[in-house]
Amino acid sequence: LSPELETFLAAGEPPIYFGFGSIRAPQGLSQAMVQTARTLGRRAIILRGWADLSPIDDASDCLAIGEVNPQALFKRVAAVVHHGGAGTTTAAALAGTPQVVIPQHYDQHYWARRVQELGIGTAHAPGAPTTDSLTNALRGALQPAVVVRAQAIAIVMRRDGTLVAAQRLLTVA
């Protein structure tokens, strides 16, 4: 992680991570994210991504970042709010960090459902997030039972899926 990000993480309680990676974000998302974090008394890390998200002001409780190693970062945040891509969903699950999935396309709706079904976070209601809807979703994800469940699932997740899949393909061929 960059020195700037390390300094931000060390400056207080674990923040909320907000990121939409390589997809376009709904209109007004930056505003909703920052206001949600502040409503919950949390700091925010915002991944700029392709949507070029950014804090809404220069306050010290928000940090905008570029590319980051999610495996290194997600273990150090209170929750991960994201679009529901398979990689981000898996990285948050492996970190044992609760997540809020705001699906936009295709398989992201599946991952949002799985996060909800597994009890490791919250699937955001359909539609563009507002401060109220995002605050409610994050409140659910930050419940102690969800935090414990996310940590328990992380412990039992397999990390050798690619190897197992390759081995099975080789035995079939």
Image (cartoon, grey):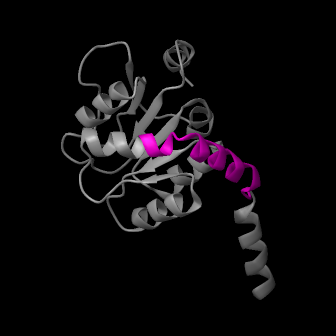
Q: Can you say which quadrant of the picture contains the C terminus?
A: bottom right
In this rendered view, identify the residue nearer to me: 101 or 66. 101
**Residue 123 placement: quadrant:** bottom left
Point 31% across, 29% down: residue? 34
Placement of 12 over or under 83, stated as above or below = above
In this rendering, does residue 20 appear at all? no
Placement of 128 over or under 80, stated as above or below = below
Does residue 23 appear left or right of residue 99 in this picture?
Answer: left
Magenta residues span 139-158
The percent coordinates of residue 169 (x first, y second) are 73, 80
User: Is residue 154 one of those drawn in magenta?
Assistant: yes
In this rendered view, identify the residue nearer to me: 39 or 115. 39
The percent coordinates of residue 86 (x first, y second) are 51, 58
Point 31% across, 35% down: residue? 33
Does residue 75 appear left or right of residue 13 in this picture?
Answer: right
In this rendering, does residue 109 appear at all? yes
Point 50% across, 38% down: residue? 79
Q: Residue furthest bottom?
A: 173
The percent coordinates of residue 101 (x first, y second) are 42, 52
The percent coordinates of residue 29 (x first, y second) are 25, 40
Secondary structure that dominates the magenta span: helix
Point 32% across, 57% down: residue? 125
In this rendered view, identify the residue nearer to me: 173 or 24. 24
Q: Can you say which quadrant of the picture contains the N terminus?
A: top right
